[in-house]
Image: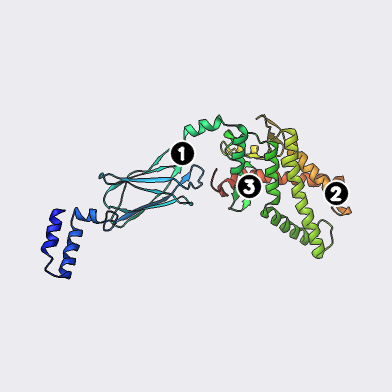
Amino acid sequence: MFGAASLLQAQDNTGPQAQNSTVAELVDAPGISARADADVPPPNAGSITGTVTDAYGDIVPGAVVDVDPSNGGARKSQVANDSGYFAVQGLVPNVAYKVTVNAPGFDPWIAPPVTLQAGQYFEVTGIKLKLSAAVTSVTVRSDPLEIATEQVQIEEKQRVLGFVPNFYVVYDSEDAVPLSAKLKFQMAYKVSVDPVSIFGAAFLAAMNQAGDTPNFQQGWKGYGQRFGAAYTDGVTDIMFGGAILPALLHQDPRYFYQGTGSTASRLRHALQNPFVCKGDNGHWQPNYSSMGGDLISSAISNAYYPASNRGAAFTFEGFAVSTGTREISSVLQEFVLRKLTSSSKRP
């Protein structure tokens, strides 16, 4: 510092332009530039970017990303944003960097060393945080109702293609716990009032209108009647088969995704879903809730369908259609929908 001050004093009589030139040279000199502005990025600096997700592919906002240079330089850290994205900039080229990602409840994730070229933007891929064993052990000792509530919160965010509700499926079967009666009614209500469920009933009514079934009149009045019938069919089915009977019979109304094993075993698991369910005691048992819900919903439709579409034959026909539809849905759950289902931030 004393040498720099002496040089500045020696240039005092050379004029402002000479002083500015000398100061610029001093700022660019090694040792002085760091003290003048330590935050100035080095020439041709590089960047390391990435997106933090968990083992399910869901984003993990708020994760802390540490980038440590191998040359003993200062660590750079950044917090992932709400989309799980981070971008650590101002990195010196030709230096190996160690990238470490930490988030509460997850094991640390470490990337292979990254060496940047001059001006390179390097994206770290495959960041998938795993739940730490410590968190898992604490969760097991928690109140079962609290665990069930958290699991339902996750399931109520599951949507196919980002918008179609896919609440009634459990992808992590080993850790699933029984639902309380309140949670069963909560799930049934949310499916019933979901905008996609209402739009689905409107679309089905349009198809029935084109096919002139049930035997309501044509025109807007007939369309309204078909919409009311389609929506009521869905609501009664989900309320009886997904809430009322499961609460009374202590059965779980959800589909438990198998995901492993031979294709034949997975297909058998899916096709038997309308007839076999898991009880709240954890044992497999006849699915009285699903079959009873389909039958009750079909029977109730006699109250609002035209006289020509009522009777025992129509009741059992409706029961058969609902059960067949449920089988198709289960097969799609097992083999297709898992890849198309996304979830919002996990609790």
Q: Nearer the viewer, residue 130 or 274?
A: 130
Kind of residue indicated by mark 2: Asn
The dot on residue 166 is 3
Kind of residue indicated by mark 3: Asn
Q: Position of residue 2 (x, y in %)?
A: 14, 54
Q: Is residue 200 above or below residue 97?
A: below
The dot on residue 335 is none
Q: Earlier in the sequence, mark 2 or mark 3?
A: 3
The dot on residue 302 is 2
Mark 1 Cα-neighbour bin, 10 Å: few <14, some 14–19, many ≥20? some
Q: Secondary structure at mark 3?
A: loop
Drawn side of residue 111 relative to residue 5, left or right? right
Q: CA distance from mark 2 to mark 1?
A: 54 Å
Q: Position of residue 57 (x, y in %)?
A: 50, 46
Q: Secondary structure at mark 2?
A: helix
Q: Position of residue 324 (x, y in %)?
A: 72, 45
Mark 2 or 1, which is nearer the eye? Answer: 1
What residue would you read off at disc 1?
Answer: 106
Drawn side of residue 209 relative to residue 90, left or right? right
Q: Nearer the viewer, residue 342 or 79?
A: 79
| Model colouring | rainbow
Q: Earlier in the sequence, mark 2 or mark 1?
A: 1
Q: Earlier in the sequence, mark 1 or mark 3?
A: 1
Split into 4 quadrants, where in the image is the C terminus? top right
Q: Residue at x 46, y 50 (%)?
A: 84
Q: Secondary structure at mark 1?
A: loop
Kind of residue indicated by mark 1: Phe
Drawn side of residue 299 relative to residue 23, left or right? right
Drawn side of residue 209 relative to residue 29, left or right? right
